[in-house]
Amino acid sequence: MNDLFSSPLLWVEQPLRAPAARSHYKILDGGGTLVAKASEEKVSLGRQAARTAVGGARERTVQVTGPGGEPLVVIHARNEGGGRVLAPNGAVIGTLDASRRGNYHSRDLNDAAGRLVGTLEAAKVGRTYRVRDAAGTQVARIDKKWTGVLKEMLTTVDRYRVEIHHPLYDPLRVLVAVSAVALDMIFFEQKDWPVPG
C-alpha cells in the first residue's frame, strides 16, 4: 500500500509557479518524505499562456502518482464546484459534492454509488476542515496554512496539513488522503492573474 493512503500525517505543498499555468503538488508524509506528486498533464504552453493572460481554467484534472511515477488516482475538479476521484482505470472511487449542511466551503464525501461516507466541515473562512465519517465521528483534520499576504494573494503557493486520527476504510481513506489537493483545485486555484482590482 502506498504511504499516501496509510500515513497519519500528510503535508500537501503547491510550489511557486507561473499563475494559472498548470496545477502541481507535492505530498509528503509527516517526516518530510515524498509519498506522491499530483500534476496536470498535457497542458500545452499555449493553454498555459492563455490561462495566465485571461485567468484560470473552470475545470482541472491532476494525475496523482507515487514517488516512482506509478499511477495512484486521478482528481477532476470544477472551480467553485465539486470533484471526482478516479482510479487509474477511470472507475469512480468517490466524489466531493457541495454539502447541504455547513457553509459554502463544506463538502460531502460520497462513494461511487453516491452514498455519504463522510463530510468535510469547513470553518467560517474555509481554511480549516473537520473530517467526519458517515456516523459523524471526527476522523481527520485539514488545515490550510497561512503563507503570508503577498503569497496568498498573488502566487500559487499553498500548504496544507492533513492529520488522520486513525486508520480509515475505503473509499473514505482515499478521499481524505487527496481532499487537500481537491479543495485547493476547487477553491484556491482561481487566485490566478489577472487579479481583480
Image: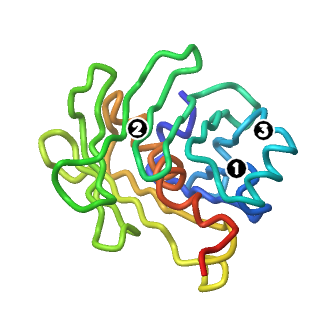
The residue carrying pointer 2 sits among few (fewer than 14), some (14 to 19) or many (20 or more) residues within 10 Å by Cα, namely many
Q: Nearer the viewer, mark 3 or mark 2?
A: 3
> Where does the image place residue 130, in percent across and percent down from the top left?
28, 59
Residue 157 in the image: x percent, y percent?
Answer: 66, 67
Who comes first in sequence, dot 3 or dot 1? 1
CA distance for labels 3 and 1: 12 Å
Q: Amino acid at mark 3?
A: Val
Give the residue at x 54% y 40%: 4
- Depicted 63 relative to depicted 86: above or below: below
The residue depicted at 56 percent of the width and 38 percent of the height is 3
Mark 2 to mark 1 CA distance (whole Å): 18 Å
Mark 1, residues whose alpha carbon is within 10 Å: few (<14), some, or many (≥20)?
many
Left or right placement of residue 127 versus residue 89 in this view:
left
For residue 111, which quarter of the picture? top left
| Residue sticking out furthest to the left | 135
Circles 3, 2 touching at the beta carbon (< 8 Å): no
Q: How packed is label 3: few (under 14 Cα within 10 Å), some, or many (20 or more)? A: few
Q: Which residue is mark 3?
A: 43
What residue sits right under mark 2 in the picture?
175
Q: Is residue 59 left or right of residue 141?
A: right
Q: Amino acid at mark 1?
A: His
Question: Looking at this view, is 162 or 197 the one in front?
Answer: 197
Looking at the rendered structure, the secondary structure element under dot 2 is: helix
Q: Residue lying at the far right in this picture: please name it.
A: 45
Q: Where residue 122 sits in the image (x, y, percent)?
A: 30, 62
Q: Which residue is mark 1?
A: 24
State how far apart marks 3 and 2 are (Cα): 25 Å
Q: Amino acid at mark 2?
A: Leu
Q: Residue at x 29, y 32 (%)?
A: 110
- Against 52, residue 62 (above or below) is above
